[in-house]
Each structure stands twice: as C-alpha cells, then as structure tokens.
Image (spheres, coloured by chain):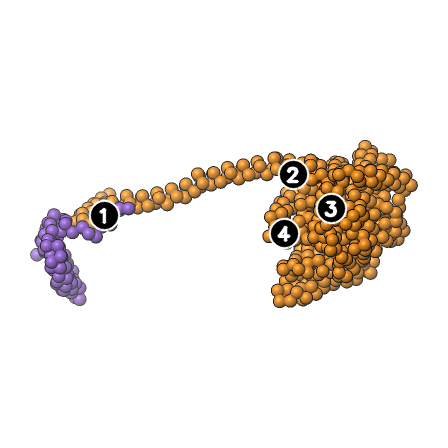
Chain colours: A orange, B purple
Amino acid sequence: MTAALLMVLIPVLAAFVGLLVGGMSRAAAAVFSVAGPASALGIAVYLAVQEPWSEPLVGTGFGGGTLPIGATVVDGLAVTVALMVCFVSLLVQIYSIGYMRHEPRYSSYAAFVSLFTAAMLAVVVAGDLLLLLIGWEVMGLCSYLLIGQHWEQEEARRAAVKAFLVTKIGDIGFIIGIVVLIGATATTLLPGAVQAAVADSTVATAASGLILLGVLGKSAQFPLHAWLPDAMAGPSPVSALIHAATMVAAGVYVVARMYPMYLAAPAVLTTMAMIACITMLGAAVVAVAQVDLKRVLAWSTVSQLAYMVAALALGARDAAIFHMLSHAFFKALLFLAAGAVIHAVGSGALRDMGGLRRAMPVTYATMTIGLLALVGVFPLAGFFSKESVLVAAEQATQGEAEVAVWVGWTVLVVSILTIAVTAAYALRVWLLTWSGPRREAASGVHEAPAVMWVPLVALSVPTVAFGFSALKDGWLPTWIQATATEPLGTVEALAPEAATIGLSVVAIMVGAGAALAARRHESFDRGSEGSFVARGFGVDAVYEALVVRPFLVMVGWVMVFDRSAIQRTVSAVGSGTLRAGGLLQRPYRGDVQRYVSTAVTGVVVAIVILLVAVAT
Amino acid sequence: MHLSLPLLLSVALFGIGVYGLLVRRNAILILMSVELMLNGVNISLVAFDVYWADVLHAGQSLAIFVITIAAAEIGLGLAILLLLYRVRSTIAIDEVTQLHEDAS
C-alpha cells in the first residue's frame, strides 16, 4: 500500500464512516467531513517533502502480471495538483459546516464531497488507465449527486441529469480512447501506454482525439459545455469545489498527464485550440448578460477553462497547469464568497444585491481580490497565470509550437478580446454586488459566520501570493514540469513578457471602461434575461432540436415497436398455447368407451408394427 | 394337449370381453366383459404354467391372485353402479360423461 493510494482511500473511508455516524450526530458527520481531506492533505504534504520532481515514484499496483490495478504515479505534477485539491476540498468542507447548517441531508452531502475528493485524487495520482477511468467516473457520479442535493427542486433534478448525460456523451469517447490506447500499446500503465503511443502517430491521434471528447465534457468546453451553467443549481460549496476548482480542471489535468501523446497529434492540438477560442470568448460574452451571480461565475469558469485548453493546444502544458492552479484558488474563492452573499441575501439574482460593502466587509474584501485575480490584475495569481498563457500564444505566433502560426495568432487575439470581456463582466458583478444602493431584498444582511469567512481568507492568501511562485525556476516550474513521462529537462520560469502585459492592460481598461459606460443602461443590473446571448447563444435550443427531440421521437418508435411487436408476440405465445391445449382437449368428451377403443386401437396398431418389424 | 387350444380359448374369451367392453352400453354387461377378459388371461396363465412345468407354479399363483383382484374389482364396480343408479336412475355408460372438462 503506497502513500498515494492511502491518500485516495482515506477520504473514501471518511465518507462511509461519516455517512454511518452522520445519521446520529451532525457534529460527527462534520468531524469526518473535515478529517477526510485533512488527512489526504497531510499525505500530500508528506509526498511533497519526498521531492517527487527529482525521482517520480511509479507504484506497481495490485495483481501484478499484465493487468495491475491501482498503479500510481507520484511526480511533481501529481503532487502539486493533489495539494491544491486537498487544500480546496478541506476549505470547502469547513465552509460547508456553516453554509449547510440548516440542510437536513448534511451527512450524505459531506460524504459525497469526501468521496468526490477521493475520486479526484485517484485521477491525479492514477498510474494506470483503469484507475484513471474509475476516478473519472466516480467524479461524474458525485457531481450528479451533489448537483441534485436539493432534489425537491425541479431545477436541481433537471440540472443533475443534464450534467450527467452531457458529460457521459464525452465519456463514451473517453472510454473508447482508453480502450484504443490499451489495445494498441498492450499495457494499462499510463506512462508506458503514453510513451508507446507517441511512437505511432495513428494511435496517438486516435487515442488523444477520443480522450479529448471526455475532456471536453468534463471541462465544459464547446460543444459539451451546456451542463456547467445549469449545474449551479447545486449548493455553492459544491460549485466551488467541483464545478470550478477540481473536476472541471480534471480534463485539463488528464491532457497534461498524457501530454507527449497529444504533442504527437498536431491535428488534435489544432482542434483543441479552435474549440478553446470559441469557448473562451463565447462563454465570456454570455457571462456579461447573466442575471444570476453564480451563473456569471459558471460561464466565467467555462471561459477560463478554455484558457487552459488553449495553452495545452499551444504546447504550453506548464502554463495550463499554472492557470489551472491559480484559477482553482481564485474561482473557489469567488464561489465561496458568492455563496456567502447568496446565503445572506437569500437570492442569487444580481438585481437583489448591491451596497453590501459595509454589511459584509470580509466577503467584500476577499471577493474583490478574487475578481481582480479573475480579470488578471497585478500582482494577483490570475495575472501571472493568464500572462503565461498569453506568452505561450505569443510564442506560438513565432512558430515555436507544434501547431501552425495562424492558430497561435487566433488564440492570442481571442485571448486578448476575452480579457476585455472578462474585465467587463467582473466589474459588472462587483458594481452590482457591492456598490450602489442597498436593495429591499438585502435589508437584514450581516457578515457570514467565522466558519464561512475563514476559508475565504485562507483562499485569498494563495490568490494573492501564488503567482510569484512561478517566477523562480526552482519553485513551481520545477514541480509541474517534472512528470513520469518526461524526465525533468531545463526548467523554464513562467515569467510574463512586456508585450503581452501591455496588450492585456489595454484590454482590461477597455473592458472596464465599457462596463462603467454601460452602468446607467437599464439592462445593466437586470441582465438580459431570456435573451439569445443570456441563453448561451441558443446552444441549448440547438441541442433541444438536434438531440433531445429526435431522441424522444426515436423513444416513441421504440415504444410503438415494444407495444405492437414485442408485447403482441408475448401475448400471442400465451393465447396460442391455451388454444392448442383446447384443441388437444377436444377428444376428451367424457365418453369412456371412446377412450378404451382408442387405447385398444393403439395396442393393436403397436402389435401389428411389432409383428411386421419382427417378420422383416 | 397342444398349447394352442387353451390359448385359442383364451384369445376368444379376451376378444369377446373387449368387444363387450367397447360396444355394450349397460354398465353391468361391461363389468361382465371385464370379467371375461380377466378369465381369458387366467386361462393363458394356467396353460403356460403347465406348458413350462414350472416348479414354483408362478402362473397358477398369479391366476389365483387375478381371481382375488377380480372379486374385489367387481365388488367395487357394483357398488359404484348402485350409487350411480340411485343418483341418475340409469346405468347407461354413454350418458355418464361428467368427467370431461369443457374446452376453454
């Protein structure tokens, strides 16, 4: 039993024990909910002090032979992401104690969050493809269960099913991709399979393209992004952990894990870049028009995830992981802060907020930091990570990436535009939440309890300071550039460059200026409810028309077939048997002499046959 | 005596019994026909016993056994017929068809 597997199994254990004792005592459920991620965090720290970047630990798993299960890979990349997952999960569990205070199903909620943490950690340390797949699917299940936490509400049920089905569509590709990879390379060990796939560009393209489908589903990229905004029907801490910091980032992480294989498939990289461009700008524009605070953040998450996918497409895995980590901190912070605001105001609509600055000073300060990081303002984490993506795009325009130069230009231009839009919606959210007059709905608002604001403060620390860790090559870059598939070469710092800084500063000012100019417009605080843009450019309607309706029609056909063909066959077998029995019954009319004469005739016939047989 | 003579008598008795069983409507005559059949079989049993000179006389023992069974059978049969006559005032066998079930 390696430490990495322990890190996965302890939260699972905590989840089950918490579920068992949670029915009796709420406090016990809370203790176990915190104990799970806390001990996982302890193990992650223990793994981190082993200096995993210098020598990746590749576990062998159980079973041995040709099909080991549970092989783990502990390298710098895995440990860094595991630290982030445990940290955010721990803070979310602490926050949930306050946020879910009046929740009747708290113990199952906390157990699902712990189980989710375990699944995410399984994906992070997975050294074989089967463990990766198990973690991946359990994450999807937990996401479904947690979105549907308030299943009394129609909206939550619909969102849960939608999230499950949409990600499942991508997961079909994911499973086929893994089967292709195992089949082509004859190994389930992840580093081995990836290295073997690199040698064969057909296998690399097929496997990476199919796995990309699963990644698009989990990381909510176009065209499989539609589930994430609806997933906001789940509780805010769940949105922070699963739908901002970890699960949606798992797609990015899996691509990073298999990165050599993706580099061997330039066509897939180009596709990724185009998808990222569409998602990035489209989702940011949709975010501007949203009515609901959490939906703004959800669309923002979709947009920010596209930055990571774009960085991956441009050959900048380190920038993608860097942005993933910093995004995890500031977006979890934003969701938790939004949860505190919604908790206090009692409504998620932006038009019900406003003027909360004095009433909720801690939430105000931390959410402001989070929004500034989201926009990418120096010196917050978002600034450095977003700049590293821009630098990658800028290098791609110089032809330094695996993809064509025009792809680099497209990503660069779209990224800059998206920064402007991001600044606009972030400023809109800030203005509507904190400044201006207090609305009626928010009259009795007061600061969240300490159990809720302490995690906010804890998350704002890395949101402020994390960016600097990438500047020195011995710090973060050493960690995330060391993987089991690629031994550590020359470490490059992820420092921003003057040209891209200039461009993004201009973009931020344009976006913020546009938001300020639009402030007097009446749709500024109402959002454009029900409009084409607010509904995500009608993607849901397209799905409705292209997928849902044809599917329902086909379901109708199946039902008709079932009733007319299958059901009739079954009843025909039944009534036919009865009728045949009736035919057989017909000679038996109670005439005993007829029975006897039949028997005698039978005996005579039998004797004649016997005699004939003996004679011949 | 040649074996075929008693066997012919046996077959004749059995055949008359079968004929009576199949064509007679009166239940008492049917019972009598059954007796004829049994006695036909008895004759062949005794004849074969003699023919094979069986030291254990299995054929004769079996014949006595059959006679016993026949006595019991006729007692039972007559009792049933008596009851049948009391209930239905007839012992015509083709009018007693209550054992069959209507086809569904």
Where residue A340 appears, as percent x and y from the top left, is: 74, 54
Q: How far, Cα to Cα, is label 2 from label 4?
A: 20 Å
Q: Residue at x 55, y 39 (%)?
A: A552
Which mark sits nearer the N-terminus, 1 or 2?
2
Q: Which residue is mark 2?
A: A540
Q: Residue at x 61, y 35 (%)?
A: A546
Which mark sits nearer the N-terminus, 2 or 4?
4
Secondary structure beneath disc 1? loop
Q: Are marks 2 and 4 on the same chain?
A: yes
Give the amino acid type for the residue marked by disc 1 in the picture. Tyr
Q: Residue at x 75, y 42 (%)?
A: A525
Q: Which residue is mark 3?
A: A350
**Parent chain of label 2:** A
Most foreground residue, A213 or A97 = A97
Q: Are marks 3 and 2 on the same chain?
A: yes
Give the amino acid type for the residue marked by disc 4 in the picture. Gly
**Parent chain of label 3:** A
The picture quadrant where one finds residue A351 is top right
Most foreground residue, A391 or A265 = A391
